[in-house]
Amino acid sequence: MEAIYRLKRILRTGWLVRGIPRSSVESVAEHSFGAAMLAWEICHRLAERGIDVDPYKTVVMALIHDLPEALTLDLDAEASRVFGDAKREAEEKAAKRVFDGKLLDIWREFERRESQEAKAAKLADTLDMALQALEYSRVGFEACREFLDSAERDARELGLEYLLVFKEILREWGAERR
Amino acid sequence: MEAIYRLKRILRTGWLVRGIPRSSVESVAEHSFGAAMLAWEICHRLAERGIDVDPYKTVVMALIHDLPEALTLDLDAEASRVFGDAKREAEEKAAKRVFDGKLLDIWREFERRESQEAKAAKLADTLDMALQALEYSRVGFEACREFLDSAERDARELGLEYLLVFKEILREWGAERR
Amino acid sequence: MEAIYRLKRILRTGWLVRGIPRSSVESVAEHSFGAAMLAWEICHRLAERGIDVDPYKTVVMALIHDLPEALTLDLDAEASRVFGDAKREAEEKAAKRVFDGKLLDIWREFERRESQEAKAAKLADTLDMALQALEYSRVGFEACREFLDSAERDARELGLEYLLVFKEILREWGAERR
Amino acid sequence: MEAIYRLKRILRTGWLVRGIPRSSVESVAEHSFGAAMLAWEICHRLAERGIDVDPYKTVVMALIHDLPEALTLDLDAEASRVFGDAKREAEEKAAKRVFDGKLLDIWREFERRESQEAKAAKLADTLDMALQALEYSRVGFEACREFLDSAERDARELGLEYLLVFKEILREWGAERR
Amino acid sequence: MEAIYRLKRILRTGWLVRGIPRSSVESVAEHSFGAAMLAWEICHRLAERGIDVDPYKTVVMALIHDLPEALTLDLDAEASRVFGDAKREAEEKAAKRVFDGKLLDIWREFERRESQEAKAAKLADTLDMALQALEYSRVGFEACREFLDSAERDARELGLEYLLVFKEILREWGAERR
Amino acid sequence: MEAIYRLKRILRTGWLVRGIPRSSVESVAEHSFGAAMLAWEICHRLAERGIDVDPYKTVVMALIHDLPEALTLDLDAEASRVFGDAKREAEEKAAKRVFDGKLLDIWREFERRESQEAKAAKLADTLDMALQALEYSRVGFEACREFLDSAERDARELGLEYLLVFKEILREWGAERR
């Protein structure tokens, strides 16, 4: 449980090093909340496209997907490069410490990226980053728009239906907010 | 979905008006993350005490319980007093706008406080406030300890088993962190 | 008096939810200071246009116009919509608690918007929002410019001379600052 | 008018260098709001003690008393020592630039500390610092209590009735808030 | 040594009054770190151009060049104007209090701007301001670009080789970061 | 050079996860400034005890000792544990990217902890953490005092004279500040 309160304080490094003001940088907890909420929405849109996915399990998966960062911290792209494979090993070690049995299974399922739930939760993770980048750029932090390209690449890797849901939500967002 | 990003920005008023530095005041999103994570733990402890409760549904319930605050904002005790019954009505109106059908049902079930899931999610809400108050007081913000009493009262109202789980977790927390 | 110190902490919700960094969001106290200072200037410009208005009383009126927000908090446009008429009632209830006799009279005069002092104080309230929006947009927070239109509408409602003073000051500001 | 918006950003140096978190340090604008509000209250308490003082003028005086700090910044005790007499001269120069005729007269009256209004406004300035120090110490920033002694010294210099009002308000504050 | 910790808290006023969010405004300590790091780089580039300069001494000089601001605070252009010559005198007084013998000599050498080390350290001071302005404008704070012109003027005053190094680094920076 | 500006933004994780408000958490740049300044003082105190150490080189060493954290980020004790030996390897890889030839030599000398300069720079690193902890606890963040014990252990490992300088400075600090 201590991990919960560390995640309320650990900042998303990608925003921080790009110069987003500290007091506007979201915590890993806030990102996890966003991802979990979007997971629900994504599941319903996937269902409409004929993909059967358990929304409850996907929400839990998205909620906990970054919990090991309570111990590893949130490494940005630069940091991930210098740590290399060690990052993965550290996450595995951290996961064993922060999760009890059932949640550890769910986290590993997420990491394997095979089940529909794992893919939907990953899309939720990616989509929250993209929408947050749009929110930042909307208020004036233009530097964040570069995240949109990498988000689309991540969505594409999950498969066509996932990419379509990603694009659909982004399009609605843009229409609604501008 | 816009509600998600408003909740990342809306601050928990109770901490703010007590003088917790703005940059340390948790957002409603962070609180919701904390409550959802604790909901899982609480369900397992209730199960050990023979209370059958669906952890997945409880997590979703705790995650969304404050979503209407995207429109009503987070009224502290003082503000709740001057708004009186209007607060409840505004929440109901806001819920209709931020939720689609299924989540609206889950939110209303939470508000009725009858099912075990609703009680467990409420305990998660209360417990996150109590643990956050302890975290604040641990770093030096002593004024937050007063929240512990009201948290215990709220837990007591849920029933004996709920109160016991509340006290058990607080005891472990205290032992671990000091 | 406790209300004074709550207002130093309560943030202007409109800026906050638009994504202005917390540490840059002005408090209601800062807005009240700005409105009170502008009230003096406005009274002198109205006098030049032949409108007789007591600058001292107008300053006091502008200074206290948001004091009930110490209890009601600062509801933004979205929140005002879900609370509807209840907002007005809550403000009235709050005003009775935070004001002694004389200030309560002055606040009610402000709310009725009939006297020249009430109109001038309202213009000060509106103008401070507009100039603050310009200050935010000047540093890079473009999203704030949308407030200028609603400010002009509010100024127009007060009458022609008020609108002219509003436009005059905005024009000077723009010329001076860019 | 530009001075108004500089004062919303200029921080009270005394709190900042003592380590109060930046996001909790009040701006000079917030202090000016506090002093102006307290000025009204002080005038009514002085009237009860038989001292005749114009509350409207005193409010304006307290509101503007730090406006020259828009140009001189807020020098703390250490900085005031190294600048010595130059501080006074810089304030006079700044006052000429930020004030039009009438407000310059009111500011100079404040600085001379002879009229009852000037003394009442000075007490408001001092009292706001003292109450803010209490607010900070209440949340856990104990280092601020040292300001209370210097505040009492300043109140004493204004005369017996002023000191009694100062002590009376501090006593009520303590009783109400603890 | 107390001066070190005051400089970690004292903010660079130029950024603050322009509206950079408090939590993004660099402290004088951060600027001094930047200047000291750049001093090393500058010395190596000057050496390549045949100018002999001790990099170790220049680093120390750049590191301490703003230490007197622990007592005088960081006066921006507006404040410097109202204080006039008094600023220089206050700095000299402050320098005597914060430095022991050897560092006082190094600081005075810096202030005379005659030795190559003094010029290189001044260039480091100027260059850090310019690069910080670019960093701020990159994330969206456009108002900071105006600092680039005054930085170039300062670099030009140091002599041709210094100006060339300044322009060279800015060009590389622009190419690398955009 | 980009590393410089990343270090102005990367926060010292130890303070952050303990709950120090974000806007009060020092950056790695601020810590590096503190360590570099203390390095000078430490060298002079070691000289008085008959230990010959080059203060200029030690200042540069302390200034750059954390520069690889621009890529590895600042891992706190928990994170260092889960990364294990990988942390050291990542730092070595990062050092090769952020340093040119001469600074890389100086950084490796620092890491070997054999020369007097390396030990003095390490003491400066440790001492800055200890004094910062005292500064935090002085304003009310009591949780930071636990860092003092680990700081003393680190100082002890450097040798008796180093420990004595450490204790001497802490003693003076305590006497001066309380």
Image (spheres, coloured by chain):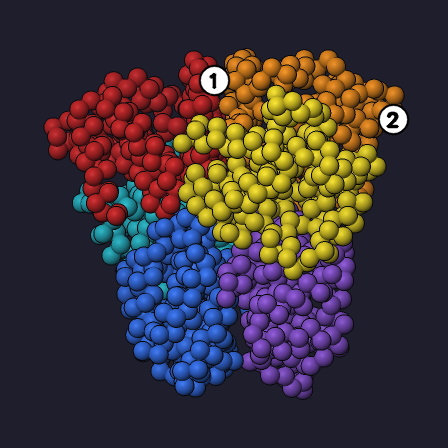
Chain colours: A orange, B yellow, C purple, D blue, E cyan, F red
Residue where numbered disc 2 is placed: A48
Q: Residue at the spot x=58%, y=61% of the render?
A: C70
Q: Nearer the viewer, residue B167 or C44?
A: B167
Task: Name the amino acid, label 1.
Answer: Val
Q: Which of the 4 image quadrants contains residue C37?
A: bottom right
Residue B54 can be seen, yes or no: yes
Q: Is residue C56 left or right of residue F19?
A: right
Q: Which mark is residue D125?
A: none
Percent across and percent down for residue C175 are 62, 65
Q: Quadrant location of the N terminus of chain A?
A: top right
Q: Nearer the viewer, residue E141 or C109?
A: C109
Q: Is residue D98 left or right of residue F33?
A: right
Percent across and percent down for residue D171 are 39, 66
Q: In the rendered view, would you say D64 is above or below E105? A: below
User: 10 Å neighbourhood of mark 2: few (<14), some, or many (≥20)?
Assistant: few
- Does dot 2 land on a helix, a strand or a loop? helix
Q: In the rendered view, would you say B64 is above or below C26? A: above
Q: Which mark is residue F82?
A: 1
Q: Do tags 1 and 2 sit on the same chain?
A: no
Q: Residue at the spot x=30%, y=38% of the render?
A: F131
Give the chain letter at badge 1: F
Q: CA distance from mark 1 to mark 2?
A: 42 Å
Q: Residue at the spot x=63%, y=44% of the render?
A: B9
Give the chain letter at badge 2: A
Task: Name the amino acid, label 2.
Answer: Glu
